[in-house]
Every structure is written in C-alpha cells, then in structure tokens.
Amino acid sequence: MSKTRRKIFGEEHELFRDSVITYIDKEIRPYHEAWEEAGVISRECWERAGRQGLLCCDVPAEYGGPGADFLYNTVVIEELSRAGFSGPGTGFAVHGDMASTYITKFGSEPQRLRYLPGMCAGTSIAALAMTEPGAGSDLQGIQTRAVRDGDEYVISGQKTFISNGQLANVVVLACKTDPSQGARGISLIIVDQLEGEDRAGFRRGRNLKKIGMKAQDTSELFFDDVRVPTANLLGGEGEGFRMLMTQLARERLVQAIRACAQTEAAIEWTVDYTRERKAFGRTIADFQNTRFELAHVAAKVAAGRALVDQQIEAYMNGELDAVAAAKAKLFLTELHCETLDRCLQLHGGYGYMWEYPIARAYADARVSKIAGGSVEVMKEIISRDLFAPR
C-alpha cells in the first residue's frame, strides 16, 4: 500500500521520502530504545533533523526554513509512523506542524526572525501549551492568566500533557488576558528561554509517564509570575481563540495523516508476520479468518487513505475547514485503534512483546483519539454542522 506513489506527490517528494527513510534508519532506529528508557529524545537528534531539513518544512527560506510545501511535512509524518517511531514523530509534528505555524502565520516580523531560524535548525525546540489540569478540549475553560504590567506580561498558571515540555525553549502559551470576555479574552504569548537563559518563575514539572509514545517527553509546566515582554504577544490581545480555531484544523489533519500511515504499516507488518508464523501445521496466513480479518481492515484503510489525501489537497488549496478536519480525525483515529487491535491479535503472544513494532504502535495509537480534540469533541463539531439551520 505505502509503496505506491499517490497522485498528490511529485518526484521531488518521493526523493525527499527516500532521504527521510535513510535518516530514520541511521539517526533514530539505533537510539530509539534508549530514548524510550530515558523518556526523551536527544537534542542531537533534533539538530540532525534540522540539518536534514525534516523540521518546519514549509517555513519560508527567509526565516531559515526549507521553504517547501506541506507535502514535505506529510512525508516526515508518514515515514516516522510507518517505521513505528511515533514518539519522535509526534514531537517533531508539535514543533514543526503546530507551534511553528502560529509564529509563521500570526507572528510579527521580529518574532519570525527571532524564533523560526532556530526552530528550523533544531537548536530551539518548541511546544504548544494549551491543556490544563481542569481544561482539556474545552479551551474556553483555561485559567492561566497574563496581566499586563507596563511593557511586560506577568503570567501565572499551570499546563499539563505538554509535548516537548522537558526540552522546549520556545513555548506558545494559551492564556487569558481578559477573563471577563470568555473565549474573546484568550491570547497567545511566547514564553522563551533562548541561549541557555533562565526566565524567573518558569518551571518544568514531571516528565509524565505514558502508556505509549515513551520516547517523546510530555510535561507539566508551571508559571509563577513569569514576566515576558509585551512584544512576545502573538497577534493582538483577545485573538488567541480565533487563531487556535484556525490552526486546529491542521493539527487534526496531522493526526489523521499519522493514523492512516501507521494503520497501513500495521497491516503490512501483520501480513509479513502471518506468512512466516505457523500453527497447526500451517502458516497463520493460510487460515481464512486471518485473510478475512486483514481484508476487512484493508478495505477500510483504503477509504481512509482516499479521505486523508483529499483533505491534504484541501488544506494546500486553503479549503480545509474545521468540520472536514474533524471528520477525517474521527474516522482515521478510530480506524487506527481498531486496526492495531486486530493486527496485534493476529500476532498472538508475540504481539504483546515490546520488541515487535505492532506492540509499540498499539500503545502509541490510543492517544490519537484524545490528542488534538477527543473523538467526542469531533462528533460534537460534526453534529453541530449537521443540525445547523440551513
């Protein structure tokens, strides 16, 4: 499935794909187990990824980026997912497909020049801090405050489940500058610690232990009267919720791309395994149940692939809306978890062993139905559109 060139990709994208696969084999595969034990990938990996052009692929060249199109980002997401290394893949995506896009799209020229070159090079690592202990998918419920004091903001609050939180020195923070205005009081402010400098009051909490994605650090972040210049405000005060809603469609598309690619890979791993593994004098693939199970999920994944590629084209044409992105994320992430469960079952006891990619993928898959907005929120978005007055 994954070896057939899709029409949305050109020859240059496939040449880039080859270089990404080579990078993964050389720079990630030998070290990934150690990163899982440590709960974080090395900064050297980030810098090597930057030199290879794997980070922030669609950031313009004038800000230090490759200046490529979103299909290059797609290639990186897909190949990391197919290799079974969702931990680094997710960290790279938060950095280059989420946090960087807010700065590229909404940042001032000085902000772009200050932050994007290091992010593209992998010398600065970015995080997007939205979720709080009492506010997950409900962004309007965030409590983190930013109070203006002259030419500074004083920030107080707590964030949790923040990908890249242990390493990040550029944090795009969602906070309230005017709590009385509800969603219209949310702003985005950059909290940075560049070149080893400390920012008083900014603390990293635990590196959280997760079911899956063990190589990608996920943290609590604390802000105790942290002072940042007002120049770190993205856009204008009260524009944060609008910016988040604009960019969440891309984040949900990224989740769908990852889910689809890893689902395709899981089927391939399972076909290969069942051709070799024997039971009752036959290979597992010789049993009709095996062939029918894989045929069933392969048909669904083919439909999912068509949907994802359609949404990628829509995004590149500036036509991807929140409802379409919600449909893609809902369908692909539920299919992701369903398929990984069926494929692990066909591996038998070996599927439960961490050394097999199907086990890692199974553990990594579960968060896809939560991250970027839970499936319940996706259903709410879709149902509101269905029942909206016409």
Image (cartoon, rainbow, N blue to C red):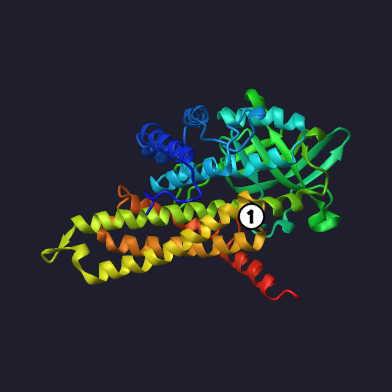
Residue at horizontal 42%, vertical 62%? 301
Residue 373: name its quadrant: bottom right
Residue 47: x, y in percent? 51, 28
Q: Quadrant of the C terminus?
A: bottom right
Q: How many marks?
A: 1
Q: Is residue 364 visible?
A: no
The residue indicated by pointer 1 is 249
Q: Is residue 46 left or right of residue 299?
A: right
Residue 314: name its quadrant: bottom right
Q: Is residue 77 left or right of residue 277?
A: right
Residue 112: x, y in percent? 71, 32
Residue 140: x, y in percent? 74, 58
* Tag 1 secondary structure: helix
The image shows residue 109, relative to residue 213, as above or below, that is above
Amino acid of disc 1 = Ala
Q: Is residue 72 left or right of residue 3?
A: right
Residue 124: x, y in percent? 60, 30
Query: Considering depth in this image, is 11 or 191 the residue closer to the camera?
Result: 11
Residue at horizontal 74%, vertical 41%? 106
Query: Considering depth in this image, is 358 or 304 the residue closer to the camera?
Result: 304
Pointer 1: residues within 10 angstroms few (<14), some, or many (20+)? many
Q: Is residue 182 visible?
A: yes
